[in-house]
Amino acid sequence: MEPMERLRIDKWLWAARFFKTRSLAAEEIGKNRVQVNGDVAKASREVKAGDTVTMRLGVQTRTVTVRGISGQRGPAPVAQLLYEETAESIAAQAAIREQRRVGSEPALAIEQGRPTKRDRRDLDGAVRHAEWDNRWSASIDPEDTER
């Protein structure tokens, strides 16, 4: 049997372990998130060794050069031989990881958390003594009905 020279992009992305299933790969291709040599790809587009594939996976964009073709999904070390990631893509991934690592903790942005027991009592006391609290219903005032 002769070695494969070309393969559908959805099969190649699945075999190279970028997506868990071929249908997921085809779905992402359908959303125009995959490009081959700078052109938006369709699922039936064939790739060959030397092609450049750019894909958006979540917040990151990965660019790889096709090194091999395989229609079978094998173990991860074998799948990694099918492509070579570009230096720019590796640098972008490192920058995203670093940004995630040093990113601020969302809880630290909260200046004031839950009220303490004393704060709660002060709030309750203020509400209890407020004039508008004495008349909480939506009934009509007799003065408003006279014309």
Image (cartoon, helix red, strand yellow):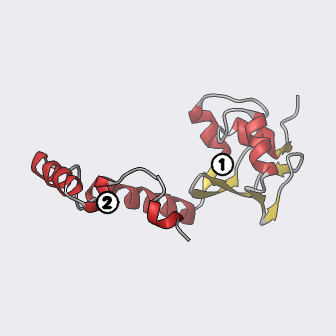
Instruction: Report the residue marked by disc 1.
Output: 83
Q: Looking at the picture, does residue 87 appear above or below residue 30?
A: below
Relative depth, front residue between 31 and 65: 31
Using residue 72 as the reference point, say whether residue 107 is left or right of it.
left
Mark closer to the chain start, 2 or 1: 1
Tell me which corner region of the image, top left, top right, bottom left or bottom right, holds residue 11: top right
- CA gap between label 2 and label 1 equals 70 Å
Relative depth, front residue between 82 and 24: 24
Using residue 32 as the reference point, say whether residue 120 is left or right of it.
left
Q: Looking at the picture, does residue 144 appear above or below residue 32?
A: below
Instruction: Report the residue marked by disc 2.
Output: 132
Quadrant of the snapshot with the N terminus: top right
Mark 1: which amino acid?
Tyr
Query: Which class describes the residues within 10 Å of circle 2: few (<14), some (14-19), or many (20+)?
Result: few
- Where residue 112 is drawn, which disc sits there? none
Counting from the top left corner in percent of width and height, residue 73 is at: 70, 30
Q: Residue at x 30, y 55 (%)?
A: 133
Relative depth, front residue between 92 and 77: 92
Using residue 77 as the reference point, say whether residue 107 is left or right of it.
left
Quadrant of the snapshot with the C terminus: bottom right
Mark 2: which amino acid?
Trp
